Amino acid sequence: MDFALSKRNCVPSMIFKNGRLIFPNGVRDGLDILVENGMITAIRAQAHAMGETIVDLEGNYLAPGFIDLHVHGAMGRDTMQASAKAFRTICDYHASGGTTSLLLTTATAPIKAIVKVLNEVRTAKASIKQIAGVHVEGPFISKAKAGAQRASLIRNPTRKAYAPLLENDDIIKRMTLAPELPSAVTLIDELQKHNISVSGGHSDAWEDDARAGFEHGMRSVTHTFNCMSRARRRGIDRVAGLVEFAMSEPEIICELIADGHHVSPTLMKMLYRAKGVRGVCLVTDATAGAGLPDGSKFSLYGTKCITEAGVCLLADRSALAGSAARMIDLVRTMVTKVGVPLHEAVAMATDTPAFVIGLTSKGQFKIGGDADLVVISPELEVLRTFLAGEEIFKA
């Protein structure tokens, strides 16, 4: 195979050699990837370098950079701190897990606080290239399924409430909402007009609520199985919740926090069997406790939390408070605990999330695509991470 980007006087500046390349349909040996100006310019059979800088992969795997659509924080820093320093710390930590693009994710908060985050992200995005935008999670969610979100700040969607968010459609790429709320479908219609991906989550929806959301454009669900309605009785009838609706509808893509705590291996396998690789999107939902030592205390927009045994918990230890995971940890779990082939687990962390928010230049090895790359050992540990051809992490 020898694909190349047609470009006059184009001499690739880097060549990635001696790796096992992970494509959505399998792992391939014997290929080089050529990179120039942060872009993949050729994928070809191995050949001698012609003056390019050689990156010797030494037989390790090479995957597209991971894309995390749901990450709140790391190393004591949280998106809601609305500072470039916090954003940089979050991005640097998650680069160690192979993440090259992410959506900084807000928590349920007053609209003014969320808008402040959006404005700070807009400024920081120019210099922090990992930031692909913002995922607004709340406040338009269900109090019955609040999870670690502050129930006192949850509200119903009204035009007055969400209008300031729609004004920031250049930064907001995704919003999680509960489709059963009054006027939720009106908000979904507005989000569609602004090209913002809609995800159902923190929801107590019945299946007819979920279907209404779907019919208006909701095409994904947030952290499947967590803070989400399930089948239950309504009168004498047994009726599906958001979980079952999402699993039964082929066009719905399901977020999955595959950290081994939020969802058991059996449930992960059930989701994989129901949805397939294109229907599952791995997300960390990492909070500020990610990367901190056990016993560290942190906050999720006013909710007190603690890390313990590598897990983020509410301070009273009654429930999980996001995760402490990186994307590579999720990929490893899918392979070792669920039995998913490596190339499919990687696709759930690259190709599928890229599709969800329309990142057409990322998520796969392709000519003209961004040279966002991650070098992975046979033990499924990240060794090196490259963003647009620039190394941003080395173990």
Image: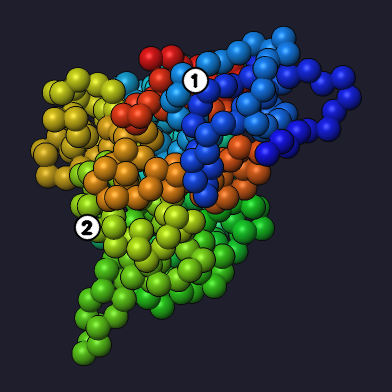
- The residue depicted at 19 percent of the width and 25 percent of the height is 297
Residue density around tag 1, few if under 14, some if 14–19, many if 20 or more, within 10 Å: some
Residue closest to the eye, 265 or 340: 340
The image shows residue 350 at horizontal and vertical percentages of: 50, 41
Residue 30 visible in rendering? yes
On the rendered image, what quadrant is the C terminus found in? top left
The local secondary structure at tag 1 comes to loop
The tally of labels here is 2
Residue 183 visible in rendering? no
Residue lying furthest bottom = 236
Q: Amino acid at mark 1?
A: Leu
Q: Amino acid at mark 2?
A: Thr
- Tell me if residue 126 comes above or below residue 159 in the rendering: above
State left or right for residue 229 relative to residue 184: left
The image shows residue 104 at horizontal and vertical percentages of: 47, 34
Give the labeled residue for mark 2. 266
Give the labeled residue for mark 1. 57
- Tell me if residue 218 comes above or below residue 195 in the rendering: below
- The residue depicted at 53 percent of the width and 23 percent of the height is 18
The image shows residue 353 at horizontal and vertical percentages of: 51, 46
Which label's residue is closer to the chain start, 1 or 2?
1
Residue density around tag 2, few if under 14, some if 14–19, many if 20 or more, within 10 Å: few
State left or right for residue 365 relative to residue 346: right
The image shows residue 120 at horizontal and vertical percentages of: 54, 26
Closer to the eye: label 1 or 2: 1
